[in-house]
Image (cartoon, rainbow, N blue to C red):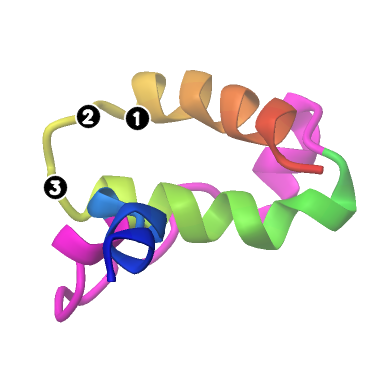
Amino acid sequence: MAKLIWSLDPLAVSRLGRASKKPPFTKKELARIGIPAHKIPRVQEELARLAADDTLTRAELGMLAEEISHLLL
């Protein structure tokens, strides 16, 4: 049981039931930033979840897009 609890992502669990917003950047904008095409859908998903909080500016989300892209395989 403890292994199951520690394997859950607390951030993902905290967002259950919340509606995600529309992605703040289009595929074209993300490609212009330098995000590879195969990573764009996943980066858009993460940015939409982050944008739902309304605490980050568009500029901050742009910087996070690059960081998210580097973390994805």
Q: At numbered mark 3, what does the secondary structure look like: helix, strand or loop?
A: loop
Whether residue 26 is visible here, answered yes or no, is no
Q: Which mark is residue 58?
A: 1
Could you say where residue 46 lies in the image, as x and y percent from the top left?
A: 46, 52
- Left or right, 39 with respect to 43, comes to right
CB under 8 Å between callouts 3 and 1?
Answer: no
Which residue occupies 13% across, 43% down? 54
Mark pair 3, 1: CA separation: 12 Å
Could you say where residue 2 lies in the image, as x and y percent from the top left?
A: 27, 61
- Extreme-right residue of the structure: 37
* Looking at the image, residue 27 lies above or below residue 22: above
Q: Which residues are magenta?
A: 12-35
Name which residue type carries label 3: Asp
Which residue occupies 77% across, 32% down? 32
Q: Which mark is residue 56?
A: 2
CB under 8 Å between callouts 3 and 2?
Answer: yes
Q: Which residue is mark 3?
A: 53
Mark toward the start of the polypeptide (3 vs 1): 3
Q: Which is in the foreground here, disc 3 or disc 1?
A: 3
